[in-house]
Image (cartoon, rainbow, N blue to C red):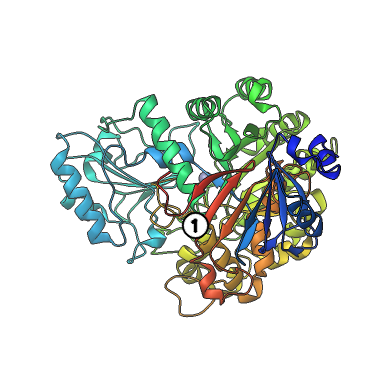
Amino acid sequence: MTPLRILLALGCSSLVAAPVTVFTNGKILTVDDAFSVTDALAVEGARIVAVGEAAKTLGRQGAGVEVVDLGGRTMLPGLMDSHSHPVGAATMEFDHAIPDIENIPQLLEYISSRAKSLPEGSLIGIDQIFITRLKEQRYPTLEELDRAAPVHPVQFRTGPDSMLNSAALRLAGIGRGFKVPAGQTGVVVFDEAGEPTGLMHAFSPKIEAKAIRRQPNPAETLQLVKRLFADYNSVGFTTIADRGAGQSGIEVYRKLKESGELSVRLRLSHTFGAGGQWRTTEAALDEIIKNPLSRPDPMLQIIGTKIWLDGGMLTGSALMAEPWGVSRIYGITDKEYRGVQRTPSEHLTKMIRKVSEAGLQFTAHSVGDGAVQLLLDAYEAVNQEVPVQASRPSITHSNFMTPASIAQAARLGVMVDMQPIWFYLDGATLLKQFGDERMSRFQPLRTLFDAGVVVGGGSDHMQKIGSLRSINPYNPWLAMWIAVGRHCRDLDRTLHPEGGISREEAIRLYTINNAKVLFLERETGSLEVGKRADFIIVDRDVLACPLDDLKTTQVRETWLDGKRIWTAGVEQ
Ligand SMILES: [Zn+2]
């Protein structure tokens, strides 16, 4: 019993220093193991001190206890996003606002407008517009790009893949007979006449041109990141994982923490150069391991490292177990093409061993079932010598999984960080490419839950502020609705609805499961005595409302560590 509780028990509440707040008359989803629903919860300082009857008893103590009537509203644990890139996303539109681009004409219009405002010869870079999400479901052609920008080099980047116009090809030295230099990965595509089409998969061309873009200074960056975090709070997030943290981003977070302005808990997967010599890789890993931020901390902690094992599903470069198949959408002409492996296998087990021996989480961007298998086999190999489970090895994205790899992940204790929003935005295009049978292995949430694999939900938010206008949209209610109902945009039916999960499980994706993925389940992720008081109050009964209403759930209040940090309708 805490001193306060003893005082209350003795009836000496007038001596109470730290106030207790008791929330009553609510529908409180605790998200404990049994998914218990209760009606009262008591908070003292940063912690939950009682739930249910015990909380109501506290509420009757009178002085020193504040009672809040929830008026029947639903309360649940603060939500967590297991995959974001906050600094890049927050600063994306610092130079200029980027319009929503849904089709090729809008894309070309944007490129033309950039060509008008940028000096001749400077690079027009278009980042992360996914062709699977364009109405035409294809890359812009070389001719289209040349027409939109006849003199400026243009690089249309989508994931690790890109499409160049003629000026950019020239400035990158890519012409007839070009070969990918030794030591570099990727594929440059040529037409039947042997001319480059402008398309390249997982290859980074060196375009000799300057990109002119105003960059925010450190103070401006800080303000933008703060604004993004407030927006995360507005949709219910109290914890976010940065799945690609580097030094400059970490510095921003450190400053926000120091000044007490961090309004979300941050878990970081540190990036490092994984492609070079082992000595260099090892030195980079040593730096991460001995970084003071790699020690447990409830607000800001490096939880592990991240590498990229394959390319993208949205861009035609994910490493699949079977060939992609010839494709107009993705510009694939080789019928044996399976995708791209971006980190060579040779150092993979050594990296995993080093990271997991240090107690840190290893994760790799692995989208295709080929990459997922490669990663699982590497975890398996390391596990023969040192058990990996305690370090919570993870698979990032894991979009295609065979039943065998799901069983293997369950056996090894490997966790999965998945993006339901991709199911919604890209399902229709992927169905066209892969057909119905292969799509049964796309985000197989039901099988993962049944097998006991801990799977967490994330957005892979990387551009813009705004939960629905961002890329990828980070609205967790939309994501939960997708995980339950298996809806796809541009498809007049659900896709493999048998792969869907219950609402309770969808809530677990964004609360306790993410807490487990992010080493936080002892502190938060459910509303249980002793845990931190991270919770939200929402405007509807998310368990009982019509399913379609789940996706428009509005958050009324967001609480972190027992403090209300966000309130609907109040300027933050
Ligand atoms: Zn990402």
Regarding residue 143, the answer to whether it shows in the image is: no
Regarding residue 50, the answer to whether it shows in the image is: yes
Res 479 → quadrant: bottom right
Q: Which residue is drawn at 70% across and 53% down?
A: 513
Q: Which amino acid does label 1 sit on?
A: Asn
Q: Where is residue 493 in the image (x, y as percent from the top left)?
A: 50, 80
Q: Which residue is drawn at 76% across and 50% down?
A: 61
Tell me: residue 388, above or below residue 324: above
Q: Which residue is drawn at 45% across and 55% down?
A: 473
Left/right placement of residue 115 relative to residue 212 reads left
Tell me: residue 395, above or below residue 250: below
Mark 1 packing: few (<14 Cα in 10 Å), some, or many (20+)? Answer: many
Q: Where is residue 298 in the image (x, y as percent from the top left)?
A: 67, 35
- Please state, as top left, top right, bottom left or bottom right, where the C terminus lies in the image: top left
Q: Position of residue 391 (x, y in %)?
A: 76, 38
Q: Where is residue 515 in the image (x, y as percent from the top left)?
A: 69, 47
Return the residue nearer the eye: 506 or 526: 526
Residue marked by disc 1? 475
Return the residue nearer the eye: 129 or 258: 258
Q: Which residue is drawn at 79% across and 38% down?
A: 4
- Please state, as top left, top right, bottom left or bottom right, where the N terminus lies in the image: top right
Mark 1 secondary-structure assignment: loop
Left/right placement of residue 311 relative to residue 126 reads right
